[in-house]
Each structure stands twice: as C-alpha cells, then as structure tokens.
Image: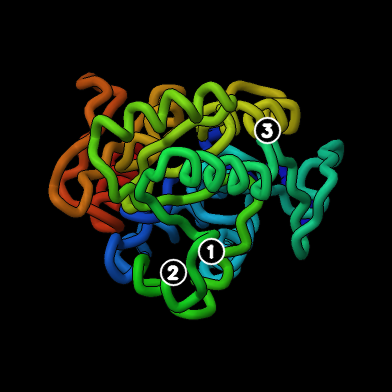
Amino acid sequence: MMQFNAKRASPQCTIVFTDLDGSLLDHTDYSHAAAAPALERLREQGIPLVPASSKTAAEIIAFNEQIDNNHPFIFENGGGIGVPRGYFPYFTAGRREGDYRLHTNGRPYTEIVNCLRSLRDRHGWRFSGFADWGTDQVMAHTGLTRVAAKAARQRLLSEPVLWQDDSATLLEFTRQLQEQNLHLERGGRFLSVQSIVDKGKAMNQLLQHYTEQYGRPIVTVACGDSPNDRSMLLQADFAVIIPDHLGRHLQIARNDRVHYASAPGPAGWREGIEHFLS
C-alpha cells in the first residue's frame, strides 16, 4: 500500500470517521449499497474514510478491501488502530495483519475472557459471549456469513456479551469490571467488555499522525448510531447521528455541527455525509 499523500487529499483537509454496523452498514444484512454515491464522492474528493468499529481488525480489513478503501481504521471500540504499511512514514506498531500494522491500546483478549469467566463462576451471573460460542452460534446471533463470523471471532482486545440476567445485577457486574480496570460499552447488538478505551481516544491517536502528515488543520466528520460512538461524535468538528434500526437517535446536542439523519443505516449515512460536504 502507498504512503498517504497530503497533496491528493481534499483542500479542506477533511477526514471522515465512521461506525460500521447500523451506520455505514445496514443493521440486518450488512449492506452498504445505499451509501455508494457518498462513498464515491469521498473517493473523488480524496477524503480519507476511517472506519471506527467494534469489529475486529480482520473484519475491517476485509471491509476495506471490499470497498477499495486504503486508509487506517479503529477496531474493537478503540482498543487498537490499524494503519496500512507505509501510509504514515513514522508509524510503528508491534503487530502485523496482512498489509496493515496494528497498534493496541488495551489488555489482551485472553485476560478479559479469564476475568469474565471468573466473575461468572463466582456469582452465577447469566451471560455469554464470543468465547463461549462456536462459529455457528456467532452466525446465529449476528446474521454474519460463515467467513465473516470467523473473522469476528479473531478478537484481540474486547469481548462482546449477551446479558441474560436482570438490570440490577448488570449494575453490580459493571462495578466489578471497573475494579478490574475494565469497561462495559453498549453497542448496537452487544455489550462489549474492554479496557478503558474508546473510539474518541483512538481517533485522536490517528489525528496526531494526520496532522503531522498534512501540516495544517484538519476538519473531522464522525458518523455513528450507538452509545459506543459517543466519544468520537463529541470530538469531531461535525457529527452525523444516525437512528438505530428502531428509529431512535442517540442524543448528544442539537446545533449546527450535528446532523440527525432521517433514515437508519447507509441511507442515513449518505444523507449526513452529503449534508456536510454540501
């Protein structure tokens, strides 16, 4: 992959950070077809598209290949960032995944899973996660294809769980995770147990590299639909709030820097991108 060339980027130095599931991708079938015109517009204008998702690095790399997107990404809710080889000349990372270099911010997956199993054994709490499921079960819970489900199980830094106990117990579960320096983040389908990281912090990591590369100020647009997008949406110069599959909007603010899209998924994503690019 080629080094990022600031001269080919948009004159406004715009970068779009986006959630995937329920935002750029449809909640049910994971299609991005309705967003195609806006994706093409970003490509034509040289505006980098940076996925920021609860998905694994393996999943996002496959998505980037699918849409021919050769830009960095944020994976597992800010647990790590992935950068194409040679994109930033001074970026270093200890892990490789294909043509990407991965920098991780949080505790490793095995530690998180061991902590969860210990809490479940000790308290009898009812929940299950990817570490408890085979590929067929991940497919059943997510609607992913077999190939995508296998990629979703290649976790490095977070564990998605389905909570099957009551809300009062969930509060105690959250408190005990905090004592272990772990955080519970709510996404579109699952609760994610992870280190104290978020998309906003990972976004800032990448922006430091982009600022050094551009040598001038950057305008950021962030798109999302779930609570795990909040930190990224608040940090961005402009935010697109996409309704979830039930039509509910995440509430952060109502001003001229926030656009509440009228449609869920990729149709709302396209609406928001076109609103700010116009």
Crowding near the residue tagged with mark 3, few <14, some 14–19, many ≥20 C-alpha atoms within 10 Å: many
Q: Residue flagged by tag 2: what amino acid is it?
A: Val
User: Does residue 205 lie above or below 244 as drawn?
Assistant: above
Q: Which image quadrant is residue 180 in? A: top right
Crowding near the residue tagged with mark 2, few <14, some 14–19, many ≥20 C-alpha atoms within 10 Å: many
Left or right side of 141 for 100: right
Q: Residue at x 44, y 78 (%)?
A: 136
Q: Residue at x 61, y 39 (%)?
A: 79
Q: Residue flagged by tag 1: what amino acid is it?
A: Ala
Which residue is the site of mark 3? Answer: 210
Which residue is the site of mark 2? Answer: 138
Q: Residue flagged by tag 3: what amino acid is it?
A: Tyr
Q: Residue at x 77, y 62 (%)?
A: 99
Q: Which mark is residue 152?
A: 1
Q: Return the x and y of residue 111 as percentages of the image width and height.
A: 67, 43
Q: CA distance from mark 3 to mark 2?
A: 36 Å
Q: Is residue 23 visible?
A: no
Q: State yes or no: discs 2 and 1 in contact (Cβ < 8 Å).
A: yes
The total of numbered circles placed on residues is 3
Q: Which image quadrant is residue 85 in? A: bottom right
Crowding near the residue tagged with mark 1, few <14, some 14–19, many ≥20 C-alpha atoms within 10 Å: many
Q: CA distance from mark 3 to mark 1?
A: 28 Å
Q: Return the x and y of residue 253 as percentages of the image width and height.
A: 24, 20
Q: Secondary structure at mark 2?
A: helix
